[in-house]
Amino acid sequence: MKLSRLSDYKKANPRGKLEVLDNVFLNTKENLAAYNIPQAASTELGNVITGYQNIVERWENPHTCTPEVCQELKDYEKATDQQVVDWLIRYIMTNPFVSPAARVGMGLPAEMRKKPVPVPIPEQKVYAEISLRTSGQVEFRIFHTPQSKKAGKPAGTSGCEFCYGAGEGLRPEECPYHEIITKSIFVKVFDSEAYDVPHTARFRWFNSKGEFGPWSTAYRFTPQPEMVSKSPPYLIP
């Protein structure tokens, strides 16, 4: 058995836990000096294994698996699970003398936890397609490349900032409405006052750190009171 995370030890079944313990014990037993692990620490782990194995064997045997043995197993795991995890952290996972490759060879994770992946600042512009519906409904579909046929966000982004307002060619700071959008397809409903009035929309991606990419080109749309055909996502030069 191999653990992808150290906390998975507590979730493993008894035989899986024993396999992990045996792998660690056998791999460290002959390398105590190289790994700078005290003999007393190795003996401590060995004693845990011996006691655990005795209970697990009785628990696995249908002739000896009684309610008392099941309870004994639960009590033993409750008493030793955290002890084992603490031992692994101290003598293996944070031990500079044990290489990541050696840890993997013992069935453990290479590192204590996964190193965070740097979140890039969005560099791409948002490309949008706008469809006009009836009763002031406007559908927005956002893409990360002009060639994309499927709406979606680029990798590393959490969503986009969407700004809009009545008027043509508005700059972002001139748009009175700003919203955070996390969906690739969304619909806005405009009041009757906005019908037949040209509007401007702009978009920009943002990541989980709150860093924003460049604003898109201005998109023009005109909310309609009645159903019209799909308008092309034309740009204002």
Image (cartoon, rainbow, N blue to C red):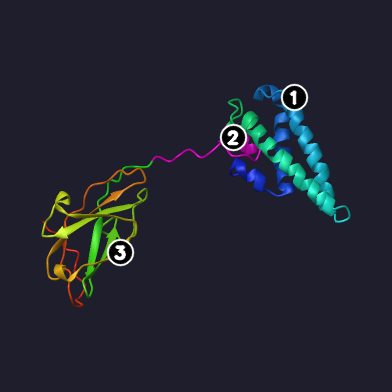
Image position of 65 with respect to 76: above or below: below
Please say whether residue 184 is visible from this viewpoint: yes
- The residue tagged 2 is 101
Secondary structure mostly taken by the magenta-highlighted segment of the chain = loop
Instruction: Tell me if mark 1 has few (under 14), some (14-19) or many (20+) residues whose alpha carbon lies within 10 angstroms of its own.
Output: few
- Residue at x 21% of width, y 50% of height: 215
Q: Quadrant of residue 165?
A: bottom left
Q: Which residues are magenta?
A: 100-118
Instruction: Tell me if mark 2 has few (under 14), some (14-19) or many (20+) residues whose alpha carbon lies within 10 angstroms of its own.
Output: few
Image position of 236 with respect to 205: above or below: below
The mark closer to the camera, 1 or 2, is: 1
- The residue tagged 3 is 186
Residue 59 x/y as whole percent:
82, 50
Instruction: Tell me if mark 3 has few (under 14), some (14-19) or many (20+) residues whose alpha carbon lies within 10 angstroms of its own.
Output: few
Q: Residue furthest right?
A: 63
- The residue tagged 1 is 40
Please say whether residue 2 is visible from this viewpoint: no
Instruction: Name the amino acid type tagged 3.
Output: Phe
- CA distance for labels 1 and 3: 63 Å
Instruction: Name the amino acid type tagged 1.
Output: Ala
